Amino acid sequence: MKIIDCDYFIVGSGMAGLMSALHLASYGKVLVVTKGRLADCNTNFAQGGICCVMDEGDTFDKHARDTMIAGAWLGDTKVVHEICEHAPEGIRDLIDCGVRFAKKPGGAWDLTREGGHSARRIFHAGDITGEKCEAAMIRRLKAAQIEYREQTIAIDLIMSRRIGLAGENRCIGAYVLDKKTDEIYAVRSPNTILATGGCGKVYLYTCNPDTATGDGIALAWRAGAKIENMEFIQFHPTCLYHPRAKRFLISEAVRGEGAILVDKHGKEFMHKYDPRGSLAPRDIVARSIDSEMKRTGDDCMFLDIRSKGRIYLQTRFPNIYRKCMEFGIDMATDLIPIVPAAHYTCGGIKAATDGKTNIAGLSAVGECASTGLHGANRLASNSLMEALVCARLTAARLGAHPAKFGGARAARPQIPAWKTGAAVPPDEAVLVAHMWDEIRRLMWDYVGIVRTNKRLARAAHRLKTLRREIRDYYFRYLVTPDTLELRNLAVCAELIVRSAQKRHESRGLHYTLDYPRASKHPKQTIIDGRSY
């Protein structure tokens, strides 16, 4: 079996993964693998922007307070302040990569505001901020000649104890599958960094790309990592509602610039639910829209930004305006139909701001990690900020204290070849497609925006059976990308349900009819990994 050696092995090519690679390149050999193209990631779809205090009337304390309020006071105050205060360094890193953030005619930064924020502090590059950041980082990655492998999916982390090595149980790399050739080989590294994003595809309706199947979270859990707060799945309140519109978001920035949430008659409704109206945090807005849809029986609600005029909308939101026009919706004259959709995984692999997990040799950065920043609900545009800051801090830790196998080739741990056993090529792909669809539907129906004990129990019972069926299928047939993603998706679904069952209160993104009040003494939800 082929074995690739590197000093730093990064799984994932979004902002967390690529920025980690750029920072680590000066310390040793870096290898980035991604299961699609480099640009196939959540970062590339981010519209709004990146939080960073830069205005004279704003402060880090205000940003931290807004973050804690949005997170229903479940965030770690120390972590929140640390990440907010390091945000300017992250913005400079992107500027160094060539990102051109919007400026006002006089040269000042054109900062915008989004729901939950008390000030304008969102750096943006029009309404395709993520796409421009991703493109700039990819250009810098290629210019630095950092090795990367596309169409390569991780199968499982390689743990020293599992392959019979003495001493501390640590991660020494991963088995991976080349999707182009079906070759399985190993990447051997003393430092593995998971930057695989979230698990939005666990739900039937999501604005996430098809790659968001929770791979890193499932990989880490199977290896023994602690998983935190998986019950907090953020539903973006304003996904475009149209039969031909697939996972297209109407950015939070549209509300930040004056859009109002209304019903089909044009009547505003958000002030019934929150004094902040259409600028309330996402959890409140999504739940309010869901409530209005159930109350009225309507399929969607609407955004109204007609007061801004066509010229302004075409200038400030050119991509959103153009996309809406493709579906016959003119933002300047029409209401924009919207529905909530699964958007962001606030929990994940329990990790410090410098990526450190409870497993030696394994770090986690970005959406797949749970650092304590988001608490029970993510404040708009804090995600890319976290990815930037934590990538920098993780690289600093790993660079300052490099883990190495030893200089001599003989010192490297011997990794056994991947064993297929009696597995045969799959002959009924329909089974995988059916189980994939069933998981996503039951999660949407039973573990969505509003939950109950009965719904969670039903989901848990069916998921237990499905995971057993998936396990049997996994060992009976040769691995395929679809099988691996299904396996990971099922793990994430179970982790979400188990976490939701543990939280006997309503807080942030977890709202349950059986425990409608918030606890006076909230705790983080921790699920220990299934260590080898």
Image (cartoon, grey):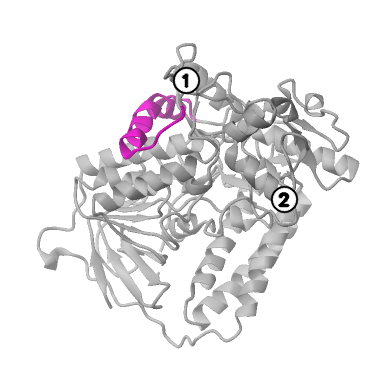
Q: Residue at x 64, y 79 (%)?
A: 430
- The quarter of the picture where the N terminus appears is bottom left
Q: Which residue is drawn at 45% across and 88% down?
A: 422
Which segment is the magenta one? 76-102
Whether residue 51 sits left or right of residue 148 in the image: it is: right
Residue 367 on image: x %, y %: 48, 45
For the stretch drawn in magenta, what is the main secondary structure?
A: helix
Residue 282 on image: x %, y %: 65, 34
- Which element is circle 1 on? loop
Residue 60 on image: x %, y %: 45, 19
The question of residue 89 being in magenta is answered with: yes
Residue 123 higher or lower than 463, as above or below: above
Residue situated in front as seen by the camera: 123 or 9: 123
Q: Which residue is drawn at 18% across and 64% down?
A: 412
Quick one: label 1, few (<14), some, or many (20+) residues within 10 Å?
Answer: few
Residue situated in front as seen by the camera: 238 or 125: 125
**Residue 132 in view (yes/no):** yes
Label 2 vs 1, first from the N-terminus: 1
Whether residue 449 sits left or right of residue 136 in the image: it is: right
Name the residue beneath numbered marker 2: 327
Residue situated in front as seen by the camera: 378 or 105: 105
- The quarter of the picture where the C terminus appears is bottom left
Query: Which mark, residue 105?
Result: 1
Q: How far apart are marks 2 and 1 (CA)?
A: 33 Å
